[in-house]
């Protein structure tokens, strides 16, 4: 797993908590915040944004990475997911695919909750043999 400095992890957790506080989740009431570290050392964040047409909901992780792209960043070295659930929240399948688009296979994915419990994975543990931009090279 690629190593991230502790102070950066702290920064990511704080940003993910801030995203959590801004979640728009009136239907599930399941609030999620996410924060990612960009290759240039910046932190971007996101929250889940639900919709009355339930299927249009977008998860915190995907909104977070999109915020990074909008800020001009397309490489990320870690992503933190924050919830207030006793059971730590892993990224959903759709988010795993989007995480694999922008983070290296050995990059850190870390779940944190209100008790400060944590769980860590690499991107490839969450999505082995991912279909990525490299698979399109021989178009
Ligand atoms: N959700 C996320 O934002 N990230 C995850 O990793 C899991 C699920 C959101 C989607 C929906 O708004 C709510 O949590 C319940 O599924």
Image (tube, rainbow, N blue to C red):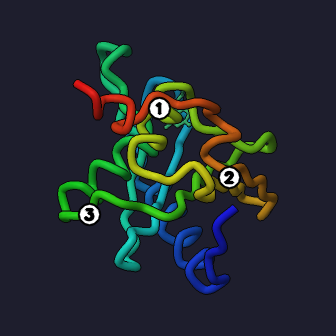
Mark 2 and mark 1 lie on one chain; the one further toward the N terminus is: 1
Depicted 53 relative to depicted 68: above or below? above
Q: Which residue is mark 1?
A: 97
Question: What kind of element bears circle 1?
Answer: helix
Report the Cα–Cα distance between label 2 and label 1.
17 Å
* The one of 104 and 15 positioned closer to us in this rendering: 104
Q: Quadrant of the N terminus?
A: bottom right
Question: What kind of element bears circle 3?
Answer: loop
Q: Which residue is mark 3?
A: 73
Q: Is residue 74 rendered to the left or right of residue 45?
A: left
Which residue sits at x=56%, y=80%?
A: 8
Question: Decide: marks 2, 3 in contact (CB < 8 A)?
Answer: no
Which residue sits at x=54%, y=62%?
A: 78
- Whether disc 1's CB lies below 8 Å from ligand 1 is answered no
Q: Which residue is mark 2?
A: 111
Report the Cα–Cα distance between label 1 and label 3.
18 Å
């Amino acid at each position: 797993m690629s190593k991230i400095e502790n102070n950066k992890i702290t920064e990511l957790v704080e940003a993910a908590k801030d995203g959590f506080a801004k979640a728009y989740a009136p239907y599930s009431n399941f609030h999620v915040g996410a924060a990612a570290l960009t290759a240039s050392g910046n932190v971007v964040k996101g929250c889940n944004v639900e919709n009355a047409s339930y299927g249009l909901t977008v998860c915190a992780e995907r909104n977070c990475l999109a915020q990074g792209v909008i800020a001009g960043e397309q490489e990320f070295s870690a992503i933190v997911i924050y919830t207030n659930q006793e059971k730590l929240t892993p990224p959903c399948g759709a988010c795993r695919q989007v995480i694999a688009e922008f983070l290296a296979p050995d990059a850190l994915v870390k779940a944190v909750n209100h008790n400060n419990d944590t769980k860590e994975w690499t991107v490839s543990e969450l999505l082995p043999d991912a279909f990525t931009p490299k698979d399109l090279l021989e178009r």
